[in-house]
Image (tube, rainbow, N blue to C red):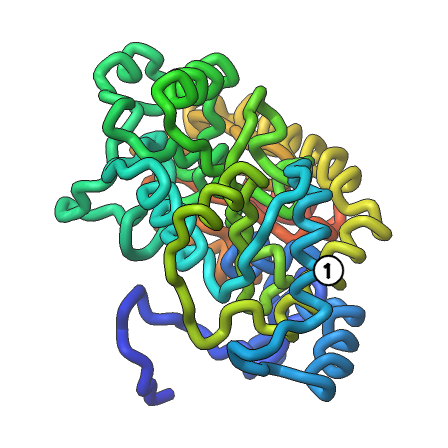
Amino acid sequence: MTSNILPLYPTARVEAIKSEGCYIYDANGKKYVDFEAGVWASNVGHCHPRIVAAFERYSKEMLHHGYRFTNPYTNKLAAKLNELTGIANGSSVILSSGSEAVNLSITLAMHLTKRSKIAKISNSYLSAYGHGAISPNNSSVVTAEYNNRASLSKIDFSQVAAVVLETGGASIEMVKIPDNDFVNELLELGKKHGCLTIAEEVTTGMGRMGKWFGYEHYNAAVDMVVTGKGLGSGFPISAVTASEVVANQLNADPIRYAQSHQNDPIGAAIALETISIIEEEQLIQRCQAIGEYFYQKLEQLKEKHPYKVKEARGRGLMLALELYKEIDTDSIDRALFEAGYVTGYKNSTFRFLPPLTIPKEDIDQLAAYLEKLLE
């Protein structure tokens, strides 16, 4: 198949023609179990019937309206995000992508504090571009070494606008969950020096870690929460939710930010339906239970193959299995995909972020096939 797509990341190998629930189907009808939930976005499963119905219904009403109008769906979503985050009387802006939302939250923090730096944990991936990008040319980022409390003393927090907290980076070092003491000290130092706290929940939010948001696992009082990915069940939508204090400061010291698809109605309507599905189908409670079941399956692989499996780790349905570097993990990755299992893979580590609806049977079959490959 000839491709006219710019090669900005590794070329895809297979043409998909359908996705449903936890499965993706290629042009030959082959079924793949998606242990990545797309790009960690389809938390309620691919093409959930209620999401499809919501899209059909609301797309007939209004896709877009421009700057002179508001709509009921963005206002309802903003109120719901206040409820979920616990930010009383907060305010939100609805955007399109996680990277955009992360960068806006950092821009707002820099504007309000008149500082030019942000602090993040070393295994965090914040955004594909801008203030949060991983680049030698990004002078905005100050890094706290993962779980190294001594490294915090090297940070000049007086220059830091915000501590940007991601609680389980899926991209860098593949699902390492920072310790409570480390995170709490990082946030306390930031607060002591007048830094804002931004919870970066693009991947870790919307039930992925067994709570609505990853920061809820810590003693974290946050000023802004960034959501994306699972917020739209695969539809491109993100949000920045700011505390009442931050919103009041922005009213007193405003900043202009406008783009074409800001506060669009269709994404907000789909996000509201997504939240209703998670609540009504009790997917967060399910994530806790099935996540623990999945983790135990990975731990059993480690127990059976202690010289091949280095570590199983994760929280909720954000999990990873790291093998020793001596193992031919490239072959294992190829074999998994050829057998119809879509997983993340990098640096001898396999990543699993399936939809929160993943059946136990699929977890059992994946674990059995991994067992076979390790043997």
Between 79 and 231, the one nearer to me in the picture? 79
The residue that disc 1 covers is: 76
User: What count of labels does the image hold?
Assistant: 1
Q: Residues within 10 Å of mark 1 (few under 14, many from 20)?
A: few
Between 243 and 117, the one nearer to me in the picture? 243
Residue 282 location in percent, x, y?
A: 82, 45
Asked whether, in this view, residue 228 is left or right of residue 12, the answer is right
Query: In this view of the protein, can residue 328 be seen by the observer?
Result: no
Residue 141 location in percent, x, y?
A: 25, 38
Residue 60 location in percent, x, y?
A: 72, 88
Quarter containing the N terminus: bottom left
Residue most extreme to the front = 252
Q: Quadrant of residue 300?
A: top right
Asked whether, in this view, residue 362 is left or right of residue 198, the answer is right
Q: Amino acid at mark 1?
A: Lys
Residue most extreme to the right = 280
Between 151 and 338, the one nearer to me in the picture? 151
Residue at (46, 24) in percent of width and height: 178
Residue at (63, 32) in percent of width and height: 295
Question: Label 1's element?
Answer: helix
Residue 252 location in percent, x, y?
A: 44, 46
Q: Is residue 273 above or below residue 222?
A: below
Asked whether, in this view, residue 254 is left or right of residue 95, the answer is left
Q: Is residue 136 above or below residue 21?
A: above
Query: In this view of the protein, can residue 210 be seen by the observer?
Result: yes
Residue at (79, 69) in percent of width and height: 50
Asked whether, in this view, residue 83 is left or right of residue 234, the answer is right
Q: Is residue 61 above or below residue 341?
A: below
Between 375 and 195, the one nearer to me in the picture? 195
Residue at (76, 34) in percent of width and height: 289
